Image: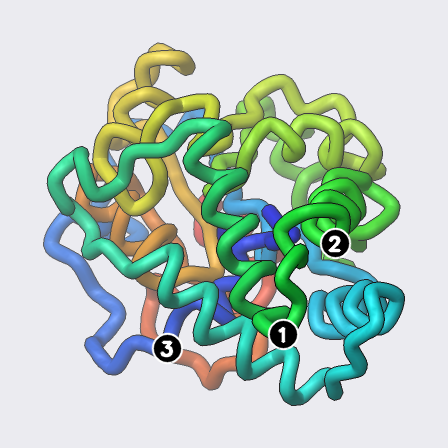
Amino acid sequence: MTRGTPGPLPSSAGAKPAERPLASPSATAPGQRRRPIRAVLFDAVGTLFHSAPSITRVYADAGAQAGIVLSEAEIGERFLAAFRRHFGRPAAGSPEELTRSSEAIERDRWRRIVADVFEELPDASGTLFEGLWDHFSRGSSWRLFADVTPTWTALAERGLRIGIASNFDRRLLAVVRDLPTLAECRHVYHSAGVGHAKPGVAFIRAIEADLGLSPDELLFVGDDRVNDYEGAANAGWHSLWLGRQRPAEGPHHIQSLMETLEWLA
Ligand SMILES: [Mg+2]
């Protein structure tokens, strides 16, 4: 999360780097576009902002307060295992029942993740969970990446509509409101509100309908190859995969959000 937290959806936590080449039949290369792009949708966690302090630090501190001392390395391992267990990894184009979402589903998912991370604590899904849930609902727990504001400003100056599309829950609205640059965003979509999660096509179609745009007028940018890049490309959108720390990997991979501007030029 892309995926909230107690959990945000740290794509780095939930996803193994894909081995497949970064290409999709429906992802359009620059120069092949027929209609101008009208809107750009960004994934949230890992794309626009990250947890500060880190998720493992926050979990370790919360655990220590509850009486269990675990190293950040141990927390990280447990978190990753629990995240994979409870989020699963549906493929792009999966049937709708695999990507169904709601506030109750997402909250219960995170409750189970916290309970698994702190398996020694029988009541981890109580106060400890609630504290983590609240922590990650505040903008002050997150920090924008440095390339967000210049990119966002330049896109707005070009008259493009800009939105956020995340596997999160309604806490995302409060987080976004608390963060500079994003606070005024009028197109914020989260899976719990839409009723479907990425990479499901139902999530993507709901955004199209709300914006009144067709797939080829939309660009998705995100750091998760399956949930973001493949999900949007599979639905016929233009799609870019953000891998800030990855070596260059073809025309649909960008290493900075600023490259979105060059891609649109
Ligand atoms: Mg993400």
User: Which quadrant of the figure has residue 58?
Assistant: bottom right
Q: CA distance from mark 2 to mark 3?
A: 28 Å
On the image, numbered disc 3 is attached to which residue?
A: 16
Question: Could you tell which of marks 3 and 1 lies nearer the N-terminus?
Answer: 3
221 left or right, relative to 229: right
Q: CA distance from mark 2 to mark 1?
A: 13 Å
On the image, numbered disc 1 is attached to which residue?
A: 120
Please tell me which residue lies in front, 70 or 26.
70
Q: Residues within 10 Å of mark 1 (few under 14, many from 20)?
A: few
The amino acid type, in three-letter code, at marker 2 is Leu
- The percent coordinates of residue 39 (x first, y second) are 46, 28
Task: Please report the residue visible at 66 percent of the width from the left and 56 percent of the height from the top.
Answer: 123
The amino acid type, in three-letter code, at marker 3 is Lys
Q: Nearer the observer, disc 2 or disc 3?
A: 2
Find numbered disc 1 in the image and state the secondary structure of the residue it sits on.
Answer: loop
User: Which quadrant of the figure has residue 36?
Assistant: top left
Task: Please report the residue visible at 83 percent of the width from the left and 33 percent of the height from the top.
Answer: 178
14 left or right, relative to 6: left
Q: Residues within 10 Å of mark 2 (few under 14, many from 20)?
A: many
User: Which quadrant of the figure has residue 145?
Assistant: bottom right
Label for residue 246? Answer: none
Whether 245 is drawn above or below 61: the answer is below
Task: Please report the residue visible at 34 percent of the width from the left and 53 percent of the height from the top.
Answer: 227
Find numbered disc 3 in the image and state the secondary structure of the residue it sits on.
Answer: loop
The amino acid type, in three-letter code, at marker 1 is Glu
Question: Could you tell which of marks 2 and 3 lies nearer the N-terminus?
Answer: 3
On the image, numbered disc 2 is attached to which residue?
A: 128
